[in-house]
Structures are given as C-alpha cells and as structure tokens.
Amino acid sequence: MNPLVFLPVMLLLVGCKVSDQAGGHRLSREEAILAAELFIRDNGYTESSVSPEAILANEGLERYSDREKKLAFRHNTLQPNAVGAKLTGDVWTVGFAYTDSLREKYPASGRPTGRAVRFDAEGNNMQVMHKDLFLDILE
C-alpha cells in the first residue's frame, strides 16, 4: 500500500478508536440531577429504605465501616430532590439540602447549606462529598 494513503487511513482509524473510548455520553443537567437523586436514595441519605443487596458507596471520609451504623448515620439527612446542579469542566456538582432534623442539630451560617454529589460528565465515579456545600453557588 502507498505510504501516502496508508498513513492517513491509520490516523483516521486510531482517531476513531480513541474517540470511541473517550467520548462517552455527557449527561445533560436533567440527567445529572436524576442520577444524583437516585444515588443518594440508593445509598441511604433520604428517608427511603435501602435494599439489603445494595452496595453502598463510601464517602471521602467515612465515620463508620459497619453497614448498619453507616446507614443509620446517613438515614434521612438529605432532602430527596436536588436543589441545583453545576457543570465545571468535566465534573458535575449536584446539591441537596439537609432535612429539617439535621438543620436543627447544626444551625446554618445564614446561607443554605447541604451536601454535594460529585461525578464526571459521563456520570461515573459518584461520591457524596464530606464537607458542607453552600447551596446558593449552584443556582
């Protein structure tokens, strides 16, 4: 094969393969919010019950390693509906307000606070951040 034809064809094939691997579906804002809402529900942060078979995601700093203690600590700490979402670069941050019981336990600083679920633009590597989030930065 002529090298002048071979090289462009090879570059095209390699480029297609790389773009197939790196170019997953980027979530829309609505998809990111839905994914985060399902994540906090399935990991025990809302008032919903968690399936006994569910594998729980760990936070960056986890207070308990025991599953039942972890679920008891998380239970009903966050409202089930996201209050906002922001895409910064390739990272989604979706915020959730604390429940009333948790707000009474930890009075706010005058700004609405909660927790954030962060993940990449394709919806991978979801994690609840251990620090409070000022929710107004997402609006």
Image (cartoon, helix red, strand yellow):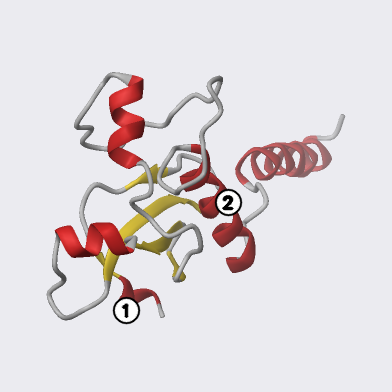
Look at the numbered disc 2 and give the secondary structure of its residue: helix
The picture places residue 121, in percent across and down from the top left corner, at 53, 54
Closest to the observer: 21 or 52? Answer: 52
Of the residues shown, which amino acid type is indicated by label 1? Asp
Horizontal side, residue 90 vs residue 23: left or right = left
Q: Quadrant of residue 78?
A: bottom left
The residue singled out by tag 1 in the image is: 136
Horizontal side, residue 72 vs residue 21: left or right = left
Of the residues shown, which amino acid type is indicated by label 2? Ala
* Residue 28 to residue 109: above or below: above
Total marks in image: 2
Q: Who's the residue at 26% across and 21% down the image?
A: 65
Q: Who's the residue at 62% across and 56% down the image?
A: 26
The disc label shown at residue 24, or none: none
Disc 1 + disc 2, Cβ < 8 Å: no
- Classify the position of the C terminus by image quarter: bottom left
The residue singled out by tag 2 in the image is: 35
Farthest residue in the right direction?
Answer: 1
The picture places residue 138, in percent across and down from the top left corner, at 38, 74
Closest to the observer: 63 or 136? Answer: 63
The picture places residue 24, in percent across and down from the top left corner, at 65, 47
Task: Give the CA distance from mark 1 to mark 2.
Answer: 20 Å
Closest to the observer: 84 or 42? Answer: 42
* Residue 112 to residue 28: above or below: below
N-term mark: 1 or 2: 2
Q: Who's the residue at 16% across and 80% down the image?
A: 110
Q: Who's the residue at 40% across and 45% down the image?
A: 45
